[in-house]
Amino acid sequence: MIDTIALYLAAPNFDVTAPSSFASKRYFPDGGWQRSQNSTAKERAANVKKPAVTWSGGRPGRPEDALRIEVSLPKLVFGNNLSELAEGDARVVLRLLSKTVAEMGVDVTEEALWQSKVSLLHVGKNVLLSPGMTCCSALWELSSVPQRATMDQTQSEFRNGGAAYKLHANQREITFYDKLLDIRRAMKSPKRAEDPLSGKLGIPGEMDSGRAGAVLRMECRFNKREGVKDALRRIGEANPDPRFSDVFREDVAMGILLRELERFEGPAGASPSARLAPLDLISSLVKGGMTSKNAITTYGLQALEREFQYATLRRVLEESGAPAAAWYRLKRFRLTAPATSADSAVHVIREALVDYVPFQMPPKASP
C-alpha cells in the first residue's frame, strides 16, 4: 500500500495559524520564498512521527501561498512501516494527518487533504517469504534477471553488502531489501539503513528470532509528479491531475507494484539456478555435466548482465573489436527457463501482491 506521499495544497485550502512554528523565510533568486518545519532531533529520538511541511509563496507564475506535506502514512498511524495500511483506513489517516498538521500550526480539513494534489508517491509491500527461502537468495534471484533497455538511464546496484537491490531510472526507483535486517542496521547505525528511522521500532521476539520467516520489502518510488502520472498511466489509470483520493487505493498501489514486478518475470528469473550464490551456481552447473570452464563463463556472463543491459554488453563487445561470432558463442551460456517457477521469489512476491493482505507486526511479548 502507500508508504510515503507528498501532498500539495494552494491557498485558500489551508490556514497557517502559527507562523512562528516555521523556520525563517528562505528567498529564491527568481522570486518567492519558502519556510519549512520538520521533526526536531529531540522528536526523532523520541520516535515522534511528524510530516515535513513546507510553506511557500510569491513564486513566479504561482503568487498564491502553497503548502507541501510529505509524510510516511504507516509511520504516522502505526509508528513504523513494517505494518501496512488498508484502503479502509482512509478516514483514520485523514483524521490523524489533519490533527498532526494542526498541532504544527496549520489548519487543513480532511476533505481538503483528500482532494489535494500528489507530487510524490512511494508504494510498497512487505512480503513474508516461503519457509526455507531467505532474503539473500531472493535478492540474488532478482538481481540475476537481465534488465531490458526500457527504463531510461537505468542503473542497478547492490547496497549494504547485498542486503538491498535497487534499479534507478529518470522518474522512478525500484527497491528490494531485507526488511528485518534493515531495522537491525538502523538500530545500530541509521546511516547504513534503507529506512534510517526504522530502528526506533525494534523487532518482536518471534520475528527477531527468525521463526516467523524472512521479510522482503518491495518498494517503488516516484519522486516527481510526472513520475506519479506515468505510473498511473502504465496501469490503465491515466490521470492528468492525480489527487490523494485517486491513489489511496489497494488496486492502484498493488497494480503499480505488479507492473514493475513484470521486469523480473521471464527467462533468467525463472531458473532456480539464478538464485544460487556464485560458488553454488558453478558447482550446480558442473554437477549437471558442464565443464568447469563453461560453468565459470556462465557465471561471468550472468554477473556482467547484472551490471549492464544485455544490449549494452553486446555493443561494448562490438566496439571493442570482438568478432560477431564471439557474441553468439557467449549467448549460449545465458541461463534461461520457459516460465517463472512456483518456488521462485518472484512467484511468492506476485502472490502477495495479488492477494493483498496488510502485513501487521505482531505485538511484542510481555517481559
Image (tube, rainbow, N blue to C red):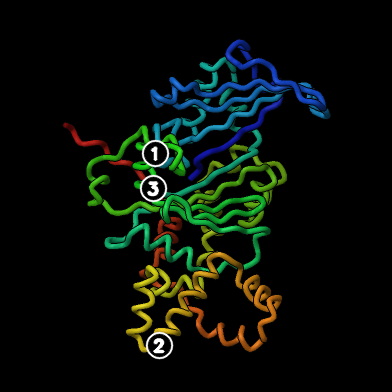
Compared with 127, 103 (above or below) is above
Q: How far from the left and from the top, in percent, is residue 232? A: 63, 51
Q: Foreground residue, 278 or 7? A: 278
Three-letter code, disc 1: Ala
Three-letter code, disc 3: Lys
Q: How far from the left and from the top, in percent, is residue 344? A: 39, 68
Distance from label 1 to label 3 (Cα)? Answer: 11 Å
Q: In the rendered view, does 325 fall on the left or right side of 38?
A: right
**SS label for mark 3:** helix
Contact, mark 1 vs mark 3 (Cβ under 8 Å) = no
Q: Which residue matches tag 3?
A: 179
Tag 3: Cα neighbours inside 10 Å, few (<14), some, or many (≥20)?
A: many
Rendered image quadrant of residue 271: bottom left
Q: Which residue matches tag 2?
A: 291
Q: Which residue matches tag 1?
A: 186
* Residue 65 visible in the shown view: no
**SS label for mark 1:** helix
Q: How far from the left and from the top, in percent, is residue 329? A: 57, 87
Picture residue at 42% right of the left edge, 53% below the top: 161
Distance from label 2 to label 1 (Cα)? Answer: 44 Å
